[in-house]
Image (tube, rainbow, N blue to C red):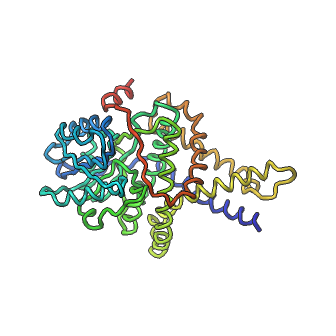
Amino acid sequence: MLGNVLLGIQVVLALIGVYQLFLTFFGWYQRKPKAQHAPQKSFAVLIAAHNEEQVIGALIDNLKALDYPKELYDVFVICDNCTDRTAQIARSMGVYACERTNPKLRGKGYGIEWMLKELWKMPRSYDGIVMLDADNLVAPDYLTHMNNDLCNGSRVIQAYLDTKNPNDSWITAAYAVTYWYCNRLWQLPRQNLGLANFLGGTGMCFETNLLKEIGWGATSLVEDLEFTMRCVQRGINPTFNFDAKVYDEKPLTFKASARQRLRWMQGHFDVARRYFFPLFWQGLKEGSWAKLDTAIYALNVYNVLIASVVTVVLWCDMMMPGLPSFASLFDYAPNLFMVIGILSYIQFPLALIMAKAPAKTWAYLITLPVFMLSWWPITVYAFFTQNNKQWSHTEHTRVIRLEEMQSKQVS
């Protein structure tokens, strides 16, 4: 009986894996650029910040130098429960420093919700709301791309997320590889197919009228995923702009990375529990591929959890004396699953080729499997601690400016 259950679970997981592998083939090309528009949309650029005095200055300098009319955008730093000089630095550099103090409701989602309410009270209104993290850098043409997308009808836009410190350690390199993979073989296929893209927590742009219409309401540990679900439920598919680049700082050590990813997975369990079934049934009733695809993505955290447990059980069973007690799906079609396994792995070097990644990054493919396998214990631990809603801050210390990154890429 247990063997049949394990086999059935393997079949379901294999089908989901094959489905995702199928989608990646639609990321091998880019559609022709949409219509270009003269700058006309105004933007409020919100920067989520908690004790970010070390990096906030570099981002503000970066934003003040964007290739977009200065009168069409304002910068607001959300100084959320800050105890350092973040607010003073922001004011001294000529942008808005909006200070919030609420130790009971901590976290980026709560900070954004508060900031939006404050923004609606201000005399000036904006066409779009951009959300960034304090450790980010953005390409000079970022707002130009957001202007084009809003003019072309997009209401929620996710930029291309890259890392600004890919060569700091094997951990930051692993993040960089997975980012290049996700941009090209997760996000772009969905954009090409007209499905819903997934918000990535930063580099996001929203039509102001949409936020006023449905509110923010995303205060979980993964506010980006939560807002994605809320949009898709309403038939609003977030879009992806492959050419709008945002660079994010990644933690240098495994410990800091594990802590960050634990928070993500705890939040992902919460969102999956609340949104999977409503979105899945809605997708079935409406015949909406976008809603079904988004529901499957919401369930991904359970896929990782179950796959890790099943794999460990099968490994332990194989190492026991005598014949294995449980059947592996691989035993039924070894050649087929060998091909699927190879195709799944070569997606990462393929993503590096498509991203024109620096040669140094290729060496980190050796340690990438360790990083990927580390998701298993993190996800299992997150499952048992998913009721922990305590937000944890990831410290940012890498002061890198855009011109430094560009010079390194050229060299």
Q: Is residue 322 left or right of residue 251?
A: right
Residue 32: image location, x then y, percent: 35, 48
Q: Is residue 376 left or right of residue 84?
A: right
Q: Residue furthest top?
A: 411
Residue 365: image location, x then y, percent: 56, 35
The N terminus lies in quadrant: bottom right
Q: 32 or 249, which lies in front?
A: 249
Q: How many marks?
A: 0
The C terminus lies in quadrant: top left
Q: Residue furthest bottom?
A: 285
Residue under the image location 39 percent in, 55 percent down: 224
Residue under the image location 38 percent in, 65 percent down: 230
Residue 280: image location, x then y, percent: 49, 69
Q: Is residue 73 above or below residue 233?
A: above
Regarding residue 47, the answer to whether it shows in the image is: yes
Q: Is residue 90 above or below residue 281?
A: above
Q: 47 or 247, which lies in front?
A: 47
